[in-house]
């Protein structure tokens, strides 16, 4: 089954407009800027990422004594922040350059002013940030500040994955700060840029799991799809209607790995618009090749990575090829509809020793906005999957421009579902795995727990029931076929139906929007949700009535996130429905 192709192909592509990334080689006039510091022995092997306003990343690795130095340009460092990544390549938190007391509140400076700076000896806090023991000259950092939780200077998100409620009042608290360079101001940055900190919690959007600080994670938040457009998204499926941590309190890492460890069930999708690398109206030949630097992530980096790419420019299957040796290529999505854009690049990295390639994909129109860089990553970590593939894993997308410049942008694996909707009642009766059949009128009432995600840094426990997802029943055959809006009933206490736009395929496939938008504790007493599906209406009354007793139809109960580039996070329960 070409499940992934349909998962991708059925979805509208995000039409959002991320602002442009800095491109091209450094201008000859750009002064070289050096950013250095000393994290101490505890920081040995940590990476320090300089993240520019537009997500452009420059990396240095701290040596055995914790010293690091980044060489960059004045323009790339102005307004950039410094971010810490563990030796295992997981996001650890921001560097606070200095702090200032403003009207009784402590405020943290996280943005550089564009000049060389030596941060000197630094403290790595167990609260998930680092700060110089002695602040550097105030001309080296921006006056722009974010509220700190304590006098230590820890931003409100320090020690978390960024899923922290930030109020408007908290966001304004530091607006009267006086120390630091005024050359970088809030109005200089569009808040939807990858390197901007939209909610002022101290984490840049690219490394923040909740960009706008409303506790609705990026995967499901309809208001932040622009800043989240480059987030990798995850496809998950299971045919076990009890594969859910609120049903199965004893759900173990091994149980999860049994599902996630199978490439047919779980994949991380990289789907990056050419526009996200080069800006709007990009040159279709403006990027020669692109690949993902996983650092020491053991599934896609390090010495012996296990990842396979299930989707290459020549094939798409559930077996794939080893990702570490895949060097890329160019594919037209539908061969019968050739590209009309004049491509000369091949998408192949001439350094075949690198691997981890994204392939260049053209989606069959003359529009240069339909040029993408893609990979379908299957981690292939077996029983270790839950411990080794985690929200917060950092990926650096490296690419070579037509002009020959090496550029990179930083991305993170975001919180996503690791279980599927778990059925508790079918047609009012407790459900334990029996055959599922419609009632005499051809309808089925489903009651179920929401799918779970793993907790991220700073959250208690192992799982969270996910709010804010969009639900729908898909009749799965050659193509994903929606059950149109009129076939749902009995959903009013849990969902709002949104199917106003017939051209929005995602809205047709999963029209039921969960009224609970934030995540809740996983528990056997957790809130459940319910709807009734008119199966007869979905498959067609004539087809249904003519079908023999025992006829089976394949459906998926899908819980999907918001539209990101090329698709959405989705967790799907495969269901066979039998005519009684
Ligand atoms: Ca946040
Ligand atoms: Ca933030
Ligand atoms: Ca984000
Ligand atoms: Ca949010």
Image (cartoon, rainbow, N blue to C red):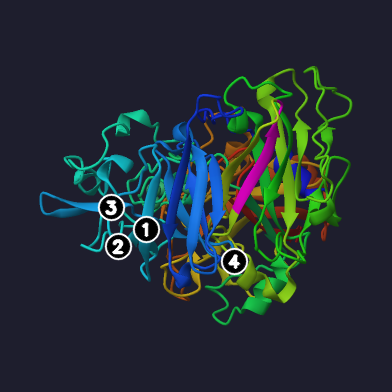
Disc 1 versus disc 3: distance between alpha carbons? 12 Å
The residue labelled by disc 3 is 98
Viewer-side label of 4, 3: 3
Q: Counting residues from the N terminus, which is met first, the one under dot 1 or under dot 3?
A: 3
The quadrant of the image that shows the C terminus is bottom right
The residue labelled by disc 2 is 133
The residue labelled by disc 4 is 88
Viewer-side label of 1, 3: 1
Relative depth, front residue between 137 and 517: 137
Query: Mark 4 and mark 2 in contact (Cβ < 8 Å)?
Result: no
Residue 174 is situated, as x and y percent measured from the top left of the image, at 20, 45
Q: Counting residues from the N terminus, which is met first, the one under dot 2 or under dot 3?
A: 3
Specify the segment rendered in magenta: 395-402
Circle 3 sits in a helix, a strand or a loop, which is it? strand
Disc 2 versus disc 1: distance between alpha carbons? 8 Å
Circle 1 sits in a helix, a strand or a loop, which is it? strand
Q: Counting residues from the N terminus, which is met first, the one under dot 4 or under dot 1?
A: 4
Task: Identify which residue is drawn at 55% across, 73% down.
Answer: 245
Q: Is 485 on the left or on the right of 196, as rendered?
A: right
Circle 2 sits in a helix, a strand or a loop, which is it? loop
Relative depth, front residue between 124 and 214: 124
Q: Counting residues from the N terminus, which is met first, the one under dot 4 or under dot 3?
A: 4
The residue labelled by disc 1 is 120
Disc 4 versus disc 3: distance between alpha carbons? 27 Å
């Amino acid at each position: 089954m070409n499940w992934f192709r349909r998962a991708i192909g059925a979805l509208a592509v995000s039409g959002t407009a991320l602002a442009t990334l800095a491109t091209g080689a450094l201008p000859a006039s750009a002064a070289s800027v050096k950013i250095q510091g000393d994290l101490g022995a505890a920081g040995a092997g940590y990476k320090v990422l300089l993240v520019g306003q537009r997500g452009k990343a420059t990396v240095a690795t701290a040596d055995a004594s914790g010293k690091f130095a980044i060489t960059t340009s004045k323009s790339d460092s102005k307004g950039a922040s410094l971010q810490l990544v563990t030796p295992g390549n997981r996001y650890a938190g921001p560097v606070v350059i200095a702090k200032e007391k403003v009207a009784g509140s402590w405020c943290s400076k996280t943005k550089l002013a564009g000049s060389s700076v030596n941060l000197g000896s630094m403290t790595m806090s167990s609260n998930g940030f680092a700060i110089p023991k002695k602040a550097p000259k105030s001309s080296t950092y921006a006056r722009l500040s974010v509220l700190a939780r304590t006098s230590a200077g820890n931003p409100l998100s320090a020690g978390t994955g960024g899923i922290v409620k930030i109020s408007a009042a908290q966001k304004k608290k530091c607006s009267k700060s006086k120390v630091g360079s005024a050359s970088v101001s809030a109005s200089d940055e569009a808040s939807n840029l990858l390197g901007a900190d939209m909610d002022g919690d101290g984490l840049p959007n690219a490394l923040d799991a909740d960009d706008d600080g409303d506790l609705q994670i990026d995967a499901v938040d309809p208001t932040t799809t622009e800043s989240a457009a480059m987030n990798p998204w995850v496809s998950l499926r299971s045919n076990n209607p009890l594969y859910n941590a609120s049903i199965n309190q004893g759900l173990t890492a091994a149980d999860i790995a049994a599902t996630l460890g199978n490439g047919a069930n779980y994949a991380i999708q990289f789907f990056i618009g050419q526009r996200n690398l080069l800006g709007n109206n990009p040159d279709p030949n403006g990027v020669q090749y692109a690949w993902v630097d996983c650092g020491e992530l053991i599934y896609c980096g390090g010495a012996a990575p296990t990842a396979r790419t299930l989707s290459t420019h020549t094939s798409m299957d559930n077996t794939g090829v080893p990702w570490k040796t895949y060097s890329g290529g160019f594919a037209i999505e539908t061969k019968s509809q050739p590209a009309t854009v004049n491509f000369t690049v091949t998408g192949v990295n001439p350094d075949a020793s690198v691997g981890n390639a994204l392939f260049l994909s053209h989606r069959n129109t003359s529009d240069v906005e339909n040029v993408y860089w893609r990979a379908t990553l299957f981690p292939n970590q077996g029983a270790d999957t839950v411990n080794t593939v985690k929200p917060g894993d950092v990926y650096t997308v490296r690419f070579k421009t037509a002009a020959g410049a090496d550029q990179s942008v930083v991305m993170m694996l975001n919180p996503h579902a690791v279980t599927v909707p778990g059925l508790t009642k079918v047609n009012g009766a407790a459900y334990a795995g029996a055959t599922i059949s419609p009632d005499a009128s051809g309808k089925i009432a489903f009651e179920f727990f929401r799918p779970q995600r793993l907790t991220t840094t700073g959250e208690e426990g192992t799982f969270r029931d996910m709010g804010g997802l969009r639900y729908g029943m898909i009749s799965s055959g050659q193509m994903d076929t929606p059950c149109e809006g009129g076939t749902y009933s009995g959903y009013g206490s849990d969902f709002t139906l949104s199917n106003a736009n017939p051209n929005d395929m995602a809205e047709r496939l999963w029209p039921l929007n969960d009224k609970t938008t934030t995540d809740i504790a996983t528990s056997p007493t957790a809130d459940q949700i319910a709807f009734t599906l008119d199966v007869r209406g979905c498959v067609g009354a004539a087809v249904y009535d003519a079908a023999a007793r025992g006829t089976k139809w394949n459906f998926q109960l899908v819980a999907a996130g918001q539209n990101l580039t090329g698709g959405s996070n989705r967790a799907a329960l495969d269901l066979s429905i039998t005519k009684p």
